[in-house]
Amino acid sequence: MSNHDLQRYVSEELHWDPKIDDSAIAVSAEDGVVTLRGTLGSFREKREAKKDAQRVYGVKSVKNELQLRILNEDRRADADLRGDVLQALMLDSMVPSTIDAKADNGKVTLSGTANWRFQRDEAESVASNIRGVISIENDVDLVPPAPSAHDVASSIENAMERNAKLDAESVEVKSENGTITLSGTVSSWADHDQAVDAAWAAPGVTRVKDHIVVLY
């Protein structure tokens, strides 16, 4: 795929998403690497724009250089911003009460512990929706639940085999002291993400080393 075509496809994908202002985003592409530049009004838009670009076939990586412009009426005192973030976290049943937050000039830092990566990711997603947030530092530590009796690597491989769209045989899984190493090749970023998600879903996993290569 040419750089011009990839740039056009990413731009069209951004235009298709009503949650972001695509007119404020400039897209460039070179050898599968897409760069996003421009100025947006919320941190959530910045996150969503990167996700949109990653979905496009042919994209190998995304450099998210989008900047934020927080209008005066959206600027928040640190105490108010932290309070709203904590309230939102508390209301989400997927976020454990062991996660805390602090705010400094619009920059939110999440801390504490969680048993699963999806809980840590959910906390970040919730915080990104709060008005006035300009960036998020996710320092939540993963503390695995009680060790499982079954073999972690085998459970991950079985999960991959159950996925009809994923060629499980092309991905190698190694497990050591809670760290999973994934290697091999897949044919799309969707397959890549599914393999990584399967690894993170296994009990006792605290780290995933992603060495998977996407080959179109």
Image (cartoon, grey):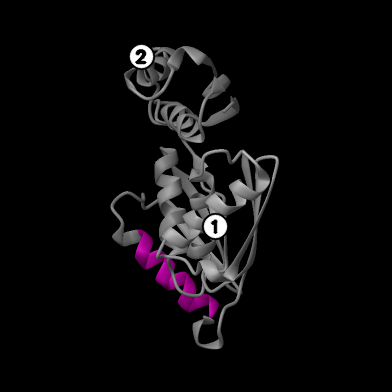
Question: Residue 114 — which label?
Answer: none
Label 1 to label 2: alpha-carbon separation: 48 Å
SS for callout 2 = loop
Q: How many marks?
A: 2
SS for callout 1 = helix
| Residue drawn at point x = 40 percent, y = 25 percent | 202
The crowd level at tag 2 (other Cα within 10 Å; few <14, some 14-19, many 20+) is: few
Residue 164 percent location from the top left of the image: 33, 22
Residue 203 colored in magenta in the image: no
The span shown in magenta is: 77-89
Dividing the picture into quadrants, the one containing residue 37 is bottom right
What residue is shown with label 1? 11
Q: Residue furthest bottom?
A: 73
Compared to 29, does 126 lie above or below? Answer: below
| Residue drawn at point x = 54 percent, y = 62 percent | 46
Label located before the other in sequence (1 or 2): 1
The crowd level at tag 1 (other Cα within 10 Å; few <14, some 14-19, many 20+) is: many
Dividing the picture into quadrants, the one containing residue 157 is top left
Q: Nearer the viewer, residue 144 or 56?
A: 56
User: Disc 2 residue type?
Assistant: Ala
Compared to 120, does 206 lie above or below? Answer: above
User: Disc 1 residue type?
Assistant: Ser
Please identify the quadrant where the N terminus is shown: top right
| Residue drawn at point x = 46 percent, y = 57 percent | 100
Please identify the quadrant where the C terminus is shown: top right
What residue is shown with label 2? 149
Residue 89 percent location from the top left of the image: 37, 60
